[in-house]
Image: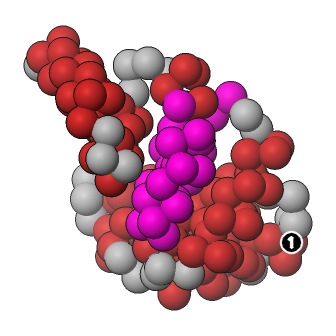
Amino acid sequence: MLFSLAKLYESRKMIDVALEHYRKILKIDAKNENALYLIGKIYLRKGSNNLAIDYFNNILEVSPNNYKAKLYLAIAYSNMFKFEKAISLFEEVLNNDRSNVDIYENYGRALIKSSNYERALEVLLVGYNLGKENLAIVNLLAEVYEKLNDTKNQELYLDIANKLAEKSA
């Protein structure tokens, strides 16, 4: 019941009320992975990366192989410019799941932020081959090619991005 109410409040953008309900769940069961995960994601969306990290780490204490928590932990570290930790976690998550396009997108974004453009290109091209309709990956590829001063490929991916944007409009 609390969980359903929390999800309802969250879907209605009543985030503080949703957080209150998720915390009530944690008072009953301090190791409830779903509540920990959803609170962590809310804090991540709000830009409260330190709080998000705490919740994702709490999940990993209970379930060390929770790759979803590791993925979002990596994103939080990347947001805080702690690229060494982020990249290590992205690699670990990627070794567990090579078919999730979101991993490639977020990993590529972290690599770009850390100025590791060659590796970003490798990662994003794999992600693109898995999901050619992923506009975020296409835009990131254009950005990487810009950083690498490869105007031809930058324009190619900008063109693809424009076509994808038109198609989804």
Q: In which quarter of the image is residue 42?
A: bottom left
Q: In this view, does 93 lie above or below 59?
A: above
For the C terminus, the image quarter is: top left
Asked if the magenta segment contains residue 119, the reply would be yes
Residue 129 figure quarter: top right
Residue drawn at x 72%, y 64% is: 89
Q: Where is residue 70 in the image (x, y as percent from the top left)?
A: 70, 62
Query: Residue 122 colored magenta?
Result: yes
Is 161 left, or right, of 169 in this rendering?
Answer: right
Label 1 sits on a secondary structure element that is helix
Amino acid at pointer 1: Val
Magenta residues: mostly which secondary structure? helix
Give the magenta part as a residue range: 99-125
Residue 74 position in % (x across, y down):
61, 66
The residue to which callout 1 is attached is 62
x 82%, y 43%: residue:
96
